[in-house]
Amino acid sequence: MTKYVVKRLLIMIPTLLGVLLIIFAINKMIPGDPAKLALGSNFTQEAYEAKRAQMGLDKNVVIQFFDYVKGVVTHFDLGTSYDTKRPVSGMILSRIGITLKLGIWSCIVTIVIGVAIGILSAVKKYSVIDYVMTTLAIIFSAAPGFWVALMSMMVFCLKLGWFPAGGMGGWRYMVLPVLCMALSPISLVVRMTRTSMLDVINQDYIRTARAKGVAERNVIFKHAFRNALIPIITVIGAQLTMVVGGSFIIESVFSIPGIGMLLLTAINTRDYPAIQGTVLVLSFFVCIINLLTDIAYAYADPRIKSQYVGGKSRGLKRKGEKQDAKA
Amino acid sequence: MPKRKVTTSGEVLEKHSQAGDVWRRFKRNKLAMVGMVIAIILILIAVFANVIAPYNPAQVSTQRLAMPSAQHIMGTDNFGRDLFSRTVYGTRVSLLISLLSLVFSLIIGIVLGATAGFFGGVYENIIMRICDILMCIPGMLLAVMISSVLGIGIVNTAIAIAVSGVAPCIRMIRATVLQIRSQEFVEAARATGSRNGRIIFHEILPNVLSPLIVDSTMRIGGNILQISGLSFIGLGVQPPTCEWGSIMSAGQEFITTFWPMITFPGIMILLTVFAFNVMGDGLRDALDPRLKQ
């Protein structure tokens, strides 16, 4: 397994370099002179030349790219904000905690609620609860997250007063943002879990398991769910990246001071270094989610695991395979 | 009366086309039919927006933030403009941008995906690696970044959304082309001396059509979510052009007292995305009967 994880970590390096290249390329397409943008409105010719040299704009584009990569890798240098004139990395680091907290909770809620409702729907197929859940899933997967956020704010915060309408504090501040972020991912996870479980439940080995008297709970969780897991992991991975990608709009609706808010402010002031810095950091999280998804595949699918398990642990692998065969 | 053909053994064969079969299977899916009806209504609203809208959507009046009434069925916005008319015109803008960006991403996707799948080698490798990297940046964020560089406006927004969603499109087309490339009829075409261009356009692409139709239908809905999101945060399309996301963005200021500016455009987005999603689901089942019996 370590070998597999290491291999996946190594693949991440060129991918992240590619992300840096794309962000750098988009940076180069910005209309206008970055040195002038950084200086603001009033400056002398000398100050302009000095700024150009300081930002490395007088060098070749390829060298500029390598300098950029070097800066990001060695001391997390994401440039200086045009707006606040402070380093972007510092601005991001001071806000990242809140975003991470929200993001991780949304991911947990997505996985737990999505999978649970999906299994329930599949087990009680064509029951009232199944119809209600699948209908809700279809509707909520079509609803824009920020609209759900605004609507729930109107209902739960302003009308009913159950939750505070914005800012950050105790758990009561987290409930609505987390739910709004997770709602559309949950609905897709529910649909995929249901389909995937139904596919498996009709297989012969499930009938065999039931026939030999395995408890229904074990049939569902040990025999069916394990085998339904691969497509579920795929959709969870994709949806968690959506959580990361969509978090900034929800942050803005609930005025949560995370990096999403930073991105929004940066967009409104056309603060390009801050936009790119935040996108880079969020893309890094997406790469980590992709990595975790791949590792989860390896745990769920013995065929992938067996490719990377060698040497001493082979005996263990056989044992594992036997258990799987039994299941 | 459908045309009938009677065989020598007396069997009656009903003449049926492939499109007819697909339609018959599609018709059986009630949810997909509902989606199609909603989609058609939305397209009609978009085309005839100037006939349907009772007021000029840019006409300001002194009746600001009026609640829904017989005169203004969705109320008026913060400049006293009729919300119903703005929402109707918003349908036109949203569908237009969505279709435009669909066309852009299809052009890039078909050209790169089909050639990558067909020719393979280093060329394919380069394109697929670029796709991998593009897919590491969440679509919405990529759209935000491109849109912030290109600026606001209908075409710029369409380009931003097309580029941010092109990687999955290239991947899907390449994967389908790879499956088809090695089949006998392609080999036969090559044996009879067809050139590569002819094989790609006449032999392979028609077979990519059905996954492409499904993907495109779903993409229309997805694009609309992104457009409204972009407009909501101040990119995308901005006032005075009517767009659902930007109406909501303006309405956010008055959220404590005035609900229609947020509720109605949101319902329109929900309906549109829902319609195209369920239609896409239905088309997938109808076009590929192997998937679902």
Image (tube, coloured by chain):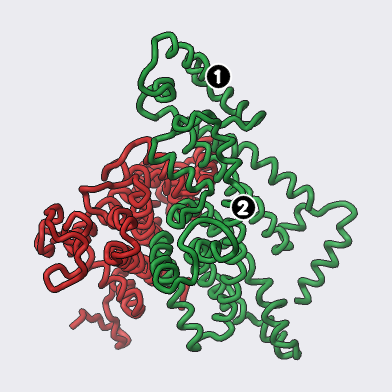
* Label of residue A63 in the image: 1
Instruction: Note whether B102 is above or below A227 in the view shown.
Output: above
Q: Which chain is red?
A: B
Residue B223 appears in the rendering: yes
Residue B182 appears in the rendering: no
- Relative placement, left or right, of A112 versus B93 is right
- The image shows a total of numbered marks equal to 2
Q: Percent x, y for residue B153?
A: 27, 42
- Comparing A77 with B51, the one in front is A77
Q: Colour of chain A?
A: green
Q: Circle 2 — which element? A: helix
Q: Circle 1 — which element? A: helix
Chain identity of mark 2: A
Residue reaching furthest to the top: A46
Q: Are marks 2 and 1 in contact (CB under 8 Å)?
A: no
Splitting the image into 4 quarters, where does residue A114 fall? Answer: bottom right
| Residue type beneath disc 1 | Ile
The residue drawn where x is 50% and y is 61% is A177
* Label of residue B69 in the image: none
Residue bearing mark 2: A289
Pick whichever of labels 2 and 1 is earlier in the sequence: 1
- Comparing A236 with B131, the one in front is A236
* Residue at mark 2 shares a chain with residue at mark 1: yes
Chain identity of mark 1: A
| Residue type beneath disc 2 | Ile
